[in-house]
Amino acid sequence: MKTKAYAKLIDGQLITSCAAEDDQGMIEMLVADGFRPYDEDAGEPEVGQYQRLEPVYFEQDDKISLYWEVVDDDPAKIGDEIQRLESLLAATDYQVVKSFEYSLAGEEVPYDIAALHTERETLRTEIRQLESLLLADA
């Protein structure tokens, strides 16, 4: 038995139901209650690293259709990436402390400080860029 989806919009919220394609009584009851055929076959577009999809529903041609809206600069995804980068930065803190200690003791520094500094500055730059995206949306 094949079913068909029906939906209606109430205050922007999608309410769905379904009925067997051959159950005319149920279909008539749903239509009388304001339900319309529901087209949920909208393909999901690809999204970038800091984007997310928001479902948008609209009434068209006596049916309700789903459309995906791409939302740029998703704060949750940006926040997650900032946390990941800050963790990478914190993971190298011990190398800086150890190098400083060796330097103060007059011993050879165990790490390539120039490379370590470049790596850490790259992380800081990425964090600042992501933080600026969050501030731009505020």
Image (cartoon, rainbow, N blue to C red):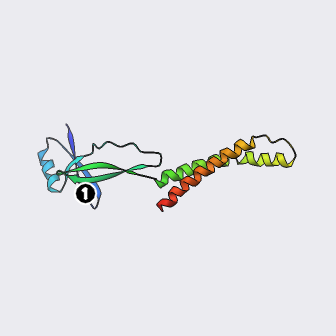
**x, y percent for residue 45:** 36, 43
Foreground of the two, 118 or 138:
118
Is residue 82 left or right of 120 when viewed as pictured?
A: left
**x, y percent for residue 8:** 23, 55
Residue at 85% in and 49% down: 104
Residue situated furthest top in the rendering = 1
Which SS class for mark 1? strand
Residue situated furthest right in the rendering = 106
Is residue 107 left or right of 128 when viewed as pictured?
A: right
Callout 1 amino acid: Leu
Say whether residue 45 is visible: yes
Say whether residue 86 is visible: no
The residue carrying mark 1 is 9
**x, y percent for residue 117:** 70, 46
Residue at 48% in and 53% down: 76
The image shows residue 99, relative to residue 137, as above or below, that is above
Using the rendered view, name the quadrant where residue 4 is placed: top left
Q: Quadrant of the N terminus?
A: top left
Q: How many numbered circles does the render carry?
A: 1
Using the rendered view, name the quadrant where residue 58 is placed: bottom left
Foreground of the two, 48 or 90:
48
Is residue 9 left or right of 51 when viewed as pictured?
A: left
Using the rendered view, name the quadrant where residue 14 is placed: bottom left
Q: Residues within 10 Å of mark 1 (few under 14, many from 20)?
A: some
Is residue 6 left or right of 13 when viewed as pictured?
A: left
Residue at 54% in and 49% down: 81
**x, y percent for residue 5:** 23, 46
